[in-house]
Image: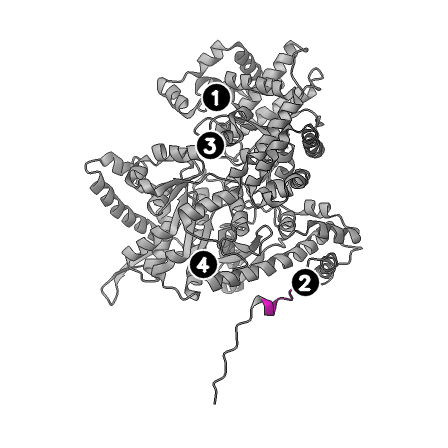
Amino acid sequence: MSSPKTPARPTSADLSPGAGVRTGLSVADLKQSFLDHLFCGLGRVPAVATRNDAYTALAFTVRDRVLKQGVRTLERYARDDARVVAYLSAEFLPGPHLANNLLNLGITEQVRQALSELGVSLDNLIEQEEEPGLGNGGLGRLASCFLDSLASLEVPAVGYGIRYEFGIFDQTIKEGWQAEVTDKWLRFGNPWEIVRPEIAYDVPFGGRTEAWTDEQGHYRVRWIPETVVKGVAYDTPILGYRVGTCNPLRLWKAEAVESFDFAAFNQGDYYQAVEDKMFSENITKVLYPNDEVLQGKTLRLQQQFFFVTCALQDMIRVHGLLGRPLDRFHEKWAIQLNDTHPAIAVAELMRLLVDVHGVDWDTAWHVTRHACAYTNHTLLPEALEKWPVPLFGRVLPRHLEIIYEINRRFLDEVRARFPGDGGRAARMSLIDESGERFVRMANLATVGAHAVNGVARLHSELLRTTVMRDFAELWPDKFCNVTNGVTPRRFVGVSNPGLTQFITERVGDGWLRDLTQLRRLEPLAADPAFLRDWRAVKLANKRRLAALIEGRAGIQVNPESLFDIQVKRIHEYKRQHLNALHILTLYLRLKNDPRADIPPRTFIFGGKAAPGYFMAKRIIRLITATADVVNADPAVRDRLAVVFFPDYNVKSAHHVYPAADLSEQISTAGKEASGTGNMKFSLNGALTIGTLDGANVEIREEVGPENFFLFGLTVDQVHELKARGYRPRDHYEANATLREVLDFIASGDLSRGDAELFRPLVENLLQDDPFLLLADYQAYVDCQERVSALWRDPQAWTRMSILNTARMGKFSSDRSIRDYCERVWRVKPVPAGA
């Protein structure tokens, strides 16, 4: 008698309806699916549905199609047993999902028609979507660009991060000052995410450790925590562009292990009954709590450990499901630490392997170092995270022990290689003992990783020769460069549809997959008709932004003026105040000579300052005060306008980058790691004025020095000037124009007679000027004269604009991901057709 056959495990082909109303892409299927979600999912009929009801129904409609690809992708990865990239980042800034998913599915026009037949505007629903408040700036946006490219290149990957209930903050401007308002991005829910309550892990904090010897005579340690919270998975599908691949972004929300103490409630202690729930949920409550106080520092460390341990436990679970032994964990997983925030992964993976799973130390260390890689994003010392040892020990007592042991073994290696060099050992130690003792997270990440990369060629070189010089001398082969990139799908395809269509009509649609195909535009830069049409696309984008500015900031601007834009995080090293000095230079020149030949220019700023950053908030006030004076003066009203665009985010960026004529990338040389805003501007046809800093160096090489406005000190000149003893007041005394501008700011004429308002800023520039504004001022003003001269020649300006776009192929995040795959991760794509 034959034995019964084991039933085959069902596949997506068995479980999904395939092409049809639920996942079909025809106008009829999309229309019916939208109505089904509106009726059955939300209990609404079109007559009473709100705009948010309609948006939610459409989001579910599109999500169905995305998830179909996601299920098939997971099946493919499991079948091929591929190595997976685990991208660990404290921030992801994906931007709105709807328009991006429509583009990637190739159904934007079908959806537009389906909704139009129902009397619904697709553009209105796209505008309705709330931006996910999961990141602050460049770090989180880069992580999201990378997830887009990983899926588009069909590389097995998962992003791991935190599901913040509230984002960093919404910015409003009150009486010229930044005011922070709670970012309630989840107030209407999030139709793109799927909660996975069955995927949850315990996260311990505090307490103590106990050591013992097991039956085999091995030294063992157990961690007895004071508190335990639970991390629950929330998945957002990240779809690739026109491919069958969809990778997950898995974010973790903190919950109490037991959310309600019934005994305490029965005894009348109602607060105690929910105390654990409140403590647990605080961990993922807000992005970047203020860490100027001990409680804020503690919460940030808790956040970082929370998402890292959930991610690692998740990887180990999946590894076990695939039947692989833990001593080969590194063969399955390529863990990328996006800056120092996830650096605790080095110690936590060791804890999980050694303490929880009984792997011996040497094997665990081999696995950890071969699994982990570290991306450094900054040369600023204050941005290289350090934790006070007492705080670290209270929150993570077992990890402090593990770090001490890693450090002991590592310093033995350093002393053996460099005998008698105690200073080197002290600099490289994972523990800073020069004063108050700190755990150095950048050092931990570097020691525990098999690869360390910077994010632009200049940054990587400075990393090797300055911040990480000792480590580079010990392990020269560990260090490499991967220049950042941006996704052309979101930052042209979604945000600049006019330019997208215009380019596609000339060179075909392959450029959104292969940005180097933009080179085909170069010959067209000599065609007068093409130049005319290019300018028309730009002017339409500028009119769109001008309308948004009037609605958001109440300022009318001339779309035919030069749009000079600086949008990024507000920080002294990014030198928004140098830009403001130039504006006031032009203003005072016009006041002194109303017939001065200054082409009409609109200066647009955007960005947030950290709530506790005194000088950055003062810079915002300088910009708004300048706007108040310039915009109200009838003598310059048709010549100059100044706008501070509030609450700058990815949704705003969709309007800003396409409208820019001039991109301000004016950081002090050697301070910006890479920058990605510079790439987005140039890709959309803006010309760059900038220093030789970060990726500006490579952008200038690619677009051609003749198509880039360069000014300012180089990195070497900055170092030489500071070594000689920089005296900023000398520049003030020697330059009458600069003196007039600073005296105008200090006089109170810019601040309604309040001479104290900008005194701290002026005194900082005259006495210290840590980012060398005054040293670069005259070169910047002279360079801006070249900008004005070129703007007077529309043909020449437009030709340079076209060449900037045409030569940006290197700066696709697709190229960055290919570099990571080759140089760091050693992973290969698993195509849908495989």
The mark nearer the N terminus, 2 or 4, is 2
The colour style of the image is one colour
Residue that badge 3 annotates: 694
Asked if residue 237 lies left or right of residue 453, the reply is right
Q: Amino acid at mark 3?
A: Gly
Q: Amino acid at mark 1?
A: Gly
For residue 416, say whether it is visible: yes
Q: Residues within 10 Å of mark 4 (few under 14, many from 20)?
A: some
The mark nearer the N terminus, 1 or 2, is 2
Residue that badge 2 annotates: 22
Q: Nearer the viewer, mark 2 or mark 4?
A: 4
What span is colored magenta in the figure? 13-20
Element at label 1: loop
Residue occupying image coordinates x 41% and y 25%: 715
Q: Amino acid at mark 4?
A: Ala
Percent x, y for residue 20? 69, 64
Residue that badge 1 annotates: 712
The mark nearer the N terminus, 2 or 3, is 2
Gap between marks 2 and 4 measured at Cα:
30 Å
Percent x, y for residue 587? 63, 16
Element at label 2: loop
Q: Residues within 10 Å of mark 2 (few under 14, many from 20)?
A: many
